[in-house]
Image: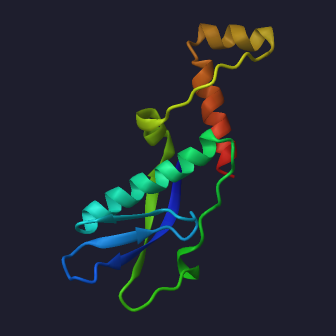
Amino acid sequence: MKLLYPAIFTPFEDGSGGYTVEFPDLPGCVSEGQDLIDAIEMGTDAACGWILDELEDGKSFPGPSSQSDISTNGKEFVNMLVLNIDAYSAKYGSQTVRKNITLPAWLNTYGEKNNINFSKVLTDALMQHASH
């Protein structure tokens, strides 16, 4: 699942070129970087972790605001960041749960004959559902 969230970038006051990154839709999700590239990477990592924590705790997460709805002061700017939750979860996710499911025999046969990974299909479907 890929998500697009607005982030507010605030330059460090010391003029060093670094930025603080805040996600207005994800309470308490703040990061920083020593330059703009680092700030984008660190912000993306923080937001992915924030959302993954919510999902692993069985909670929903807020949807993104429109970039145009976010106000800033003269020094700040808003940029949209892509959050690849699947990639982040594969790298850092700590929890998996084994589920026993029931499905029609013909669908099981179809899946097995076509080498379909049932866990992946179910995970992808649930992630798609969670993003709505």
Is residue 102 toward the left or the right of residue 96 in the image? right
Residue extending furthest toward the bottom: 74
At x 62%, y 43%, the residue is 55
Could one spot residue 9 in this view of the protein? yes
Q: How many marks?
A: 0
Observer-nearest of 44 and 117: 44
Q: Position of residue 76 (x, y in %)?
A: 39, 83
Q: Position of residue 14 (x, y in %)?
A: 22, 82
Could one spot residue 1 in this view of the protein? no
Is residue 38 toward the left or the right of residue 65 in the image? left
At x 40%, y 52%, the residue is 45
Examine the rendered structure and indicate whether residue 72 appears above or below residue 20.
Answer: below
Examine the rendered structure and indicate whether residue 89 appears above or below residue 51.
Answer: above
At x 73%, y 15%, the residue is 100
Is residue 119 toward the left or the right of residue 108 in the image? left
Quadrant of image for the N terminus: top right
Q: Position of residue 2 (x, y in %)?
A: 51, 49
Observer-nearest of 27 and 41: 27
Q: Quadrant of residue 118?
A: top right
Q: Position of residue 121 (x, y in %)?
A: 62, 27
Residue extending furthest toward the left: 16
Q: Quadrant of residue 61?
A: bottom right
At x 67%, y 37%, the residue is 126
